[in-house]
Image (tube, rainbow, N blue to C red):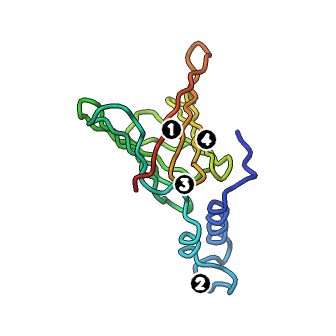
Amino acid sequence: MGDRKSFPGWLALAAAVALFACAPGGDGGEQADDVMPAETLEEAAPNPRFGVWELESDAEPPTRNVMTYEPWGEGGMKITVAQTNSEGETSEWSYTTLFDGEFHEVEGQENATTAVEVIDEHTNHIHNARNGEVYQTIVNVLSEDGNTINNEYRRTMQDGTERVSHAVYRRIG
């Protein structure tokens, strides 16, 4: 789906830790002098997306959309989206990813799955599917300063045309 040869440094380090942990004899016993413990690697190269992000919007309160990105599994991420609509009704959904392009269930959305693949150190493609059919790809781009995420939503309509929209999220935590 994309060029997977260019991995960000944090992902390459996380993959190396996962491979070492799964290697024969990698039972957590003695470590070689040149191997850095996983805890140190995570501290040295955290995913720059980890944190809390709010959608920029002109909508009147109580409307709000907040994404939380947090560590999950061995080098993965859990994404949780909490929304409040104009009537004050709230909803929340989440998914997990190892950035491998594999689809995982979306909790809080019926028959929904999501797959994430790394394109480069700033760009991920997020593929959303319902009932096994991909209906949307999000081009998720982290700014150079790490404080803004720009999402380009590309949705194929039933007539085959494509609808494109954009959203900007700012780091709030």
Q: Look at mark 4 in the image and give the residue it sits on.
A: 125
| Amino acid type at image mark 4 | His
Dot placed on the residue nearer the N-terminal end, 1 or 4 = 1
Disc count in the image? Answer: 4
Q: Which residue is mark 2?
A: 29
Measured Cα–Cα span from mark 1 to mark 4: 14 Å
Q: Nearer the viewer, mark 4 or mark 2?
A: 4
Separation of residues labelled 4 and 2 (CA atoms): 38 Å
Q: Quadrant of residue 66?
A: top left
Q: Amino acid at mark 3?
A: Gly
Q: CA distance from mark 1 to mark 2?
A: 38 Å
Residue tagged 1: 113
Residue with the mark numbered 3: 146
- Earlier in the chain: of badge 1 and badge 2, it is 2
Helix, strand or loop status at disc 1 = strand
Q: CA distance from mark 3 to mark 2?
A: 37 Å
Secondary-structure class at tag 3: loop
User: At 68% from the left edge and 87% from the top edge, which residue is drawn?
Assistant: 33
Q: Position of residue 123 (x, y in %)?
A: 63, 46
Direction from residue 66 to residue 4 in the image, left or right: right
Image height of 121 relative to 17, above or below: above
Q: CA distance from mark 1 to mark 3?
A: 27 Å
